[in-house]
Amino acid sequence: MVSYSVLAAVALAAFVIGIFFAKRRRSDTKVIWEAPAQSGPEHEAAIADPEVLSLVNQKQLIAAIKRYRELTGAGLKESKDAVEALQRSLARQ
């Protein structure tokens, strides 16, 4: 049978560890991972493509990603990041 002092010690240790990690997470800076910006003539042409812009405005991101991939030949991850960055920049305007 587990004694109450051992149980209390484990609970206290878990509480202290929780407090420690909660303080580490609190910060004034917000860290968001961003993929490096795409560049090049294919990227510029793709984000200016009326079909890509229309699809992003209609919130049809999967179709916009497919169209971006057709235009640039980029991979899925790069295309997704580029279309999401385009969506954020259009939302800010």
Image (cartoon, rainbow, N blue to C red):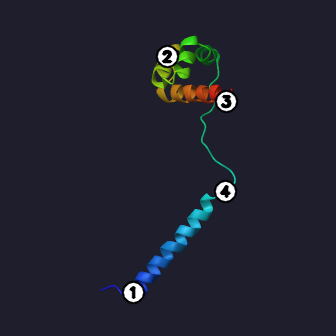
Q: What distance separates the C-alpha of mark 2 from that of mark 4?
A: 39 Å
Q: Earlier in the sequence, mark 4 or mark 3?
A: 4
Q: What distance separates the C-alpha of mark 1 from that of mark 2?
A: 64 Å
Q: What distance separates the C-alpha of mark 4 from that of mark 3?
A: 25 Å
Q: Nearer the viewer, mark 4 or mark 3?
A: 3
Look at the picture and state if 55 lies above or below 34.
Answer: above
Furthest residue toward left: 1
Q: Which residue is mark 4?
A: 27
Q: Relative to the observer, which residue lies in front, 88 or 69?
A: 88
Kindly identify the amino acid type of the residue bearing the numbered disc 3: Arg
Q: What distance separates the C-alpha of mark 2 from that of mark 3?
A: 23 Å
Q: Which residue is mark 2?
A: 67
Q: Nearer the viewer, mark 2 or mark 3?
A: 3
Kindly identify the amino acid type of the residue bearing the numbered disc 2: Arg
The percent position of residue 91, horizontal first and vertical second, equals: 63, 28
Kindly identify the amino acid type of the residue bearing the numbered disc 1: Tyr
Query: What element does badge 3 sit on?
Result: helix
Q: Earlier in the sequence, mark 2 or mark 3?
A: 2
Image-based side of 79 in relation to 86, left or right: left
Which circle marks residue 4 in the picture?
1
Q: Which residue is mark 3?
A: 92
Q: Are marks 4 and 3 in contact (CB under 8 Å)?
A: no
